[in-house]
């Protein structure tokens, strides 16, 4: 029988969505599910964005492969407001942040090359790396330190002649970690000294709490040739379905390479770009983003407080994004997540979580951990954590 390629067979399913069949079965039984497994904000997309998408021209044509000029100009203005000096020519609009990451890997590495990524990391990086033929080498980070980076020796010892880049997510998905300026400068020094690219996934840039500030890779000194910024409008503008991302770099060779990939896939979504242009031209998006961040800050506080009340649960308080990695008093977090959907309910309700083992590259790590996304309002979060607490008390597979 004909079989798919080894690349296809090696590509993993998303751990964020892999339990969806069990969730479908639970819904068919009439069970209400609180979704803490996926980073889909429940906040309405700004009306001005939706109105911009409705400004459909007579012919819905391809946009330029690098994106509409107006959209790239609007994004350049957005970054300038955040002290990131970039020109529209140094921006390529992509089909979501996912495509921007894939383009980055394709542009910096050949098949068999390696990239370093702090673990745990966004699980879909595995699929992107497999598609690009790139090996992931994990940089170990620990919950005891809030998943901050280890020392220089631990990172530098992983670099080999086949290492091409370091990829970080800042603020972090799934950890909520916000890297300190000294951590970023360490990575910049390593990139400069070992001729590596530093790719920074900054999708959650504004989601920073407790008075902390975010430093972009494009704000680091003397890194013009190595720095690549990956971004998306999905989270800060609550527009996940628009599928608008961006790749930014001051390295002209990288941008030419990315443009080739962009031309091969023809065009990023035109309607999403029209919505983005309308939103960024209003000048009011700053206030809307601030309001969104305030809501998520309150949700973070509620989630963390509720987790602290559950016996046996341990977690570091997230500093940014809208995720937390939590250790549970169970033998297998995946089996517990499956059990919640298949066998447990509290007054006709249950919770869907994401098992965390697939967010690690190192086998055996994260077996008793889950990732939770605090994308629901505070009342719903409180109810969801009440269900988790009751589920843990009743679960037969406690450690």
Image (cartoon, rainbow, N blue to C red):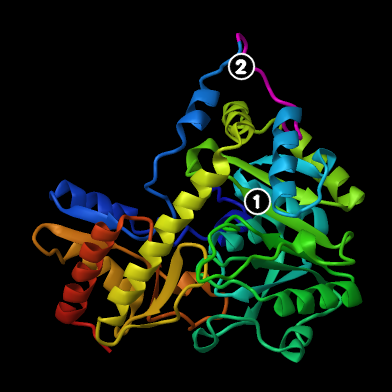
Residues packed near mark 2 inside 10 Å, few (<14), some (14 to 19) or many (20 plus): few
Residue drawn 28% across the image and 66% down it? 338
Residue drawn 29% across the image and 68% down it? 337
Q: Is residue 386 or residue 280 the one in the foreground?
A: 280
Residues packed near mark 1 inside 10 Å, few (<14), some (14 to 19) or many (20 plus): many
> Outermost residue toward the left?
347
65 within the magenta span: yes
Segment tinted magenta in the rendering: 58-67
Q: Quadrant of the C terminus?
A: bottom left
| Vertical comparison of 187 with 340: above or below | below
Q: Is residue 8 left or right of residue 32?
A: right
Q: Which residue is mark 2?
A: 60
Which of discs 1 and 2 lies nearer the camera? The answer is 1
Q: Which residue is mark 1?
A: 231
Image quadrant in which you'd find residue 266: top right
Q: Is residue 349 left or right of residue 300?
A: left
Q: Is residue 235 visible?
A: no
Residue drawn 71% across the image and 62% down it? 216
Q: In x, y percent, where is residue 304?
A: 36, 74
Query: How many marks can you see?
Result: 2
Q: Secondary structure at mark 1?
A: strand
Q: In x, y percent, where is residue 382?
A: 24, 65
Q: Is residue 9 or residue 288 the one in the foreground?
A: 288
Q: Which callout, 1 or 2, points at the residue further toward the start of the chain?
A: 2
Instruction: State the CA–CA distance, disc 1 to disc 2.
Output: 25 Å
Q: Is residue 44 visible?
A: yes
Q: Secondary structure at mark 2?
A: loop
Q: Main secondary structure of the magenta part?
A: loop
Q: In x, y percent, where is residue 174?
A: 50, 68
Q: In x, y percent, where is residue 71?
A: 69, 32
Q: Is residue 48 left or right of residue 232?
A: left
């Amino acid at each position: 029988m004909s079989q798919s390629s080894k690349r296809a067979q090696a590509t993993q399913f998303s751990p964020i969505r892999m339990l969806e069949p069990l969730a479908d079965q639970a819904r068919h039984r009439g069970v209400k599910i609180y979704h803490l497994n996926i980073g889909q904000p429940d906040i309405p997309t700004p009306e001005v964005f939706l109105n911009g998408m409705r400004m459909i021209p007579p012919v819905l044509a391809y946009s330029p492969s690098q994106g509409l000029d107006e959209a790239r100009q609007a994004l350049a203005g957005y970054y300038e407001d955040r002290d990131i000096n970039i020109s529209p020519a140094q921006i390529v609009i992509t089909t979501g942040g996912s495509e921007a990451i894939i383009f980055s890997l394709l542009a910096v590495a050949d098949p068999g090359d390696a990239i370093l990524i702090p673990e745990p990391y966004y699980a879909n990086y595995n699929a992107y790396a497999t598609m690009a033929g790139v090996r992931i080498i994990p940089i170990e980070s620990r919950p005891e330190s809030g998943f901050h980076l280890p020392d220089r020796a631990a990172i530098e010892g992983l670099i080999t002649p086949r290492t091409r880049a370091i990829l970080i997510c800042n603020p972090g998905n799934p950890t909520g970690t916000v890297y300190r300026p000294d951590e970023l400068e360490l990575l910049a020094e390593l990139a400069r000294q070992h001729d590596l690219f530093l790719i920074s996934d900054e999708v959650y840039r504004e989601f920073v709490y407790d008075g902390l500030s975010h430093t972009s890779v494009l704000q680091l000194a003397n890194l013009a040739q190595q720095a690549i910024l990956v971004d998306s409008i999905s989270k800060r503008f609550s527009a996940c379905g628009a599928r608008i991302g961006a790749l930014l770099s001051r390295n002209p060779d990288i941008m030419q390479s990315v443009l080739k990939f962009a031309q091969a896939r023809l065009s990023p979504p035109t309607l999403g770009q029209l919505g983005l242009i309308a939103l960024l031209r209003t000048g009011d998006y700053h206030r809307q983003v601030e309001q969104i961040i305030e809501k998520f800050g309150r949700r973070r506080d509620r989630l963390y407080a509720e987790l602290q009340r559950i016996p046996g649960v341990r977690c570091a308080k997230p500093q940014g994004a809208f995720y937390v990695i939590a250790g549970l008093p169970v033998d297998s977090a995946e089996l517990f997540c499956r059990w919640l959907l298949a066998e447990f309910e509290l007054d006709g309700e249950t919770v869907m979580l994401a098992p965390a083992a697939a967010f690690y590259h190192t086998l055996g790590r994260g077996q008793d951990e889950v990732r939770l996304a605090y994308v629901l309002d505070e009342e719903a979060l409180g109810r969801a954590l009440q269900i988790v607490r009751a589920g843990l008390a009743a679960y037969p597979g406690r450690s």
